[in-house]
């Protein structure tokens, strides 16, 4: 495949490429795993989450594979461009359904000089795309492309699904699972482009944990909301709709994006509608919308809402008429 085919930046969205975006814990994994079981689909689970562990050395992040990269051009993309080239070729050889299989190969590649690494990765993308048995469609789930969406869409022309979940559920889940905040509040480029124009400073280190988490959720959902405003062609899905009727809602989304339903999707939804914990997409759907009531006290709810009410969308991507 020639590079111009991988970087088709003109015309309508490509029906064989789909990207799911949302803040962490908004339901992107659940929907992504379901759609990834449609016929002829290859599913990539957070391929850009190569080394997001804050407990490890941050050199990988400085080389361009850290969380929440800010990308607005191919020049700024660094190593992410050949990585996404491989993903959208549909034949990424070392990432199937779990990002842990991508991380070792990516870390080896990071140690190569860029003059050697980037041509090798681009050549691998082109070669992989020409191999027989390529998937008909590529579905990608990402929570780290928030500040790279415009570049991603311009370069690859995927269809996009933006997901939303009640921010009280998102914040309480972040706390329960110890989702890292990274440097979203302090990175100079994020401060200059997003935080200072908003005029909403993060709570200080002595603020309650839920207040600090809420600020991060507010920032991420605000950026996604603005991107959705600029792209009315994107599909908007709420976690609450998924919980109310998973099979009907997901089937409707699959039809919108042109994916063929499969018995494997039905099996996934049936088998995973049970009690679960951690990051696995295993939950009793009907219990999820009000889960925050079990996790948060009235005082904590007030602390979260006091932070989120400063943001234009109050922690939602599309605020409901009555957010409660």
Image (cartoon, rainbow, N blue to C red):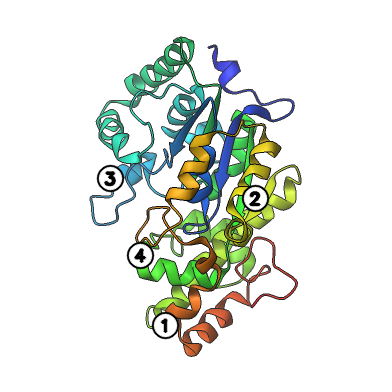
Whether the residues at callouts 2 and 3 have beta carbons within 8 Å, the answer is no
213 up-or-down from 297: above or below: above
Q: Which mark is residue 177?
A: 4
Whether the residues at callouts 3 and 1 have beta carbons within 8 Å, the answer is no
First reached walking from the N terminus: tag 3 or tag 1 = 3
Q: Which mark is residue 249?
A: 2
- Foreground residue among 45 and 153: 45
According to the picture, the residue beneath numbered tag 1 turns out to be 207
- Foreground residue among 65 and 165: 165
Disc 4 crowd, CA 10 A, few/some/many (<14, 14-19, 20+) = few
Numbered disc 2: secondary structure: helix
Q: Which mark is residue 1?
A: none
Foreground: disc 2 or disc 3: 2
First reached walking from the N terminus: tag 2 or tag 3 = 3
Q: Position of residue 147 (x, y in %)?
A: 55, 49
First reached walking from the N terminus: tag 1 or tag 4 = 4
């Amino acid at each position: 495949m020639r590079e111009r085919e991988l970087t088709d930046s003109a015309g309508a969205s490509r029906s064989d490429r789909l990207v799911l975006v949302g803040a962490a814990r908004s339901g992107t994994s659940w929907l992504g795993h379901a759609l990834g079981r449609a016929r002829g689909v290859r599913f990539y689970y957070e391929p850009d989450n190569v080394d997001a562990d804050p407990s490890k050395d941050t050199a990988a992040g400085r080389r361009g594979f850290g969380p929440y990269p800010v990308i607005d051009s191919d020049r700024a993309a660094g190593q992410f461009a050949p990585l996404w080239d491989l993903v959208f070729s549909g034949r990424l050889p070392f990432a199937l359904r779990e990002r842990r299989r991508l991380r070792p190969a990516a870390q080896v590649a990071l140690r190569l000089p860029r003059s050697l690494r980037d041509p090798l990765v681009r050549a691998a993308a082109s070669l992989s795309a020409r191999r027989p048995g390529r998937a008909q469609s590529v579905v990608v789930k990402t929570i780290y492309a928030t500040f790279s969406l415009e570049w991603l869409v311009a370069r690859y022309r995927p269809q996009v699904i933006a997901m939303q979940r009640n921010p009280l559920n998102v914040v309480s889940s972040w706390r329960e699972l110890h989702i890292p905040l990274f440097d979203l509040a302090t990175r100079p480029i994020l401060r200059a482009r997003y935080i200072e124009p908003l005029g909403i400073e993060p709570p200080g280190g002595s603020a309650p944990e839920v207040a600090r988490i809420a600020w991060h959720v507010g920032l991420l959902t605000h950026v996604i909301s603005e991107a959705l405003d600029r792209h009315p062609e994107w599909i908007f899905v709420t976690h609450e709709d998924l919980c109310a009727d998973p099979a009907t809602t997901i089937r409707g989304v699959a039809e919108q994006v042109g994916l063929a339903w499969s018995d494997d999707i039905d099996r996934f939804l049936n088998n995973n509608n049970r009690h679960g914990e951690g990051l696995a997409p295993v939950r009793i759907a009907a219990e999820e919308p009000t889960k925050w009531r079990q996790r948060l006290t009235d005082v904590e709810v007030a602390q979260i809402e006091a932070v989120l009410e400063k943001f234009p969308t109050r922690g939602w991507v599309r605020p409901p008429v009555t957010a409660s």
